[in-house]
Image (cartoon, rainbow, N blue to C red):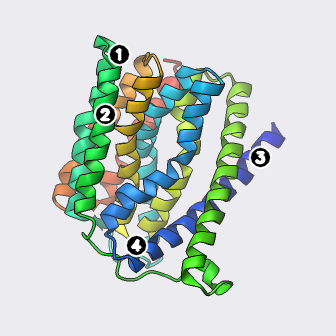
Amino acid sequence: MIETITSLLSSIVMVFLAAMLFVNTIEYVGCRFALGSSFIGAIISPLFTSFPEMVVFLVAVFVAKEETIGVGTIFGQPFMASSLSYGLVGLAAIIGYLLRKRDDLIFEVDRSLIIPYAFITILFPLTIVPSLIGFHEIFGLIFLASYVYYVWMMYKRRLAEIIEEADDLYICRIIPHPALSIIIQILCSAILLYIGSEKLVESVKELALQTGISEMGLALVIVPAATAIPETASAIIWGYRGRDTLSIGSLVGEKILYSTFYPGLGLLLTSWVLDNHAYMSVVATTIISFVLLYYIAKQRIPVYILCFGLIFFVSYVILVFVLHI
């Protein structure tokens, strides 16, 4: 048990370092190429940080032949992002405010984030429909097409909230060539993320087996909690430093992937059998998304709204691990 916990902690450190390198690189690239915060946070960042979840999903479906874990990860990640991740970002913002890294406790976000939240609010509840009426392949293609349409819409708005300044790349202190530094730092971040995430998932799985957690409990809580560290760490860092649109956009980008792209893959590659845990995840995620959509329309999100999701996380943990529902 001690060895497993040690491995878990070391992998968490590794993934967090990878996230720091990534945050620094993506801000620099956004500034250099004049891309908007909402586009960087909602499109580019999630494609990179969702890699651990992609690995878990593919391994579960094709290697371990465990569809429950693969499908459970798809429903667990949006729930974890909506509940735990937003809450941690809110707490980080409070710490940043106390340490004078932020001016206030209000997240001022770009209005273009209405688009991804509208997609989530409408599409994520629809992921349970194929399990009730069938037509998996048709729904799978619809979800994949929705993601393509979403990327196109966000790309048209890529100049919203241009990143006007960013810190130099960390590796520029060793290699002064900007283009080469970007490539090397991204590679270092990717390697750390891959090794750390794989080690992290294995450690979490081992702990779950030792404590007798069910497969669905593992899939909906443990695995997403582990694999969501990269994007959560990125969002926490950005929230702490006052880069509000990047912070909120990086988390909503993950939820978009799990409301469109990943359900599309899941519907095409699995039998898409769901249970009450998946339904609870959809209900909680949709409620939180509705609340956030309201405040994003006002372009101001109070910190306490971000912490609102923690109620759902704590409630779900009690239901699953204490009451065994």
Q: Secondary structure at mark 4?
A: helix
Q: Nearer the viewer, mark 3 or mark 4?
A: 4
Q: Is residue 120 left or right of residue 189?
A: left
Check disc 3 and report the residue beneath it: 7
Image depth: mark 1 or mark 3 in front: 1
Q: Nearer the viewer, residue 168 or 317?
A: 168
Asked if labels 2 and 4 touch by Cβ distance under 8 angstroms, the answer is no
Q: Which residue is mark 2?
A: 143
Q: Is residue 288 above or below residue 60?
A: below
Bin the neighbour count of mark 3 within 10 Å (Cα to Cα): few under 14, some 14-19, many 20 and up. Answer: some
Q: Are marks 2 and 1 in contact (CB under 8 Å)?
A: no
State the image coordinates of residue 206 (x, y, percent, origin top left).
73, 32
Rendered view: 29 above or below 151: below
Pointer 2 local density, CA inside 10 Å: few below 14, some 14–19, many at least 20: many
Q: Compute the Cα span from label 2 to label 1.
A: 14 Å
Q: Quadrant of the N terminus?
A: top right
For marks 2 and 1 on the same chain, the one whose residue lies earlier in the sequence: 1
Inspect this view and state whether residue 94 appears: no
> How far separated are the C-alphas under marks 1 and 3?
37 Å
Inspect the image, locate mark 3, and give the three-letter code of the amino acid beneath it. Ser
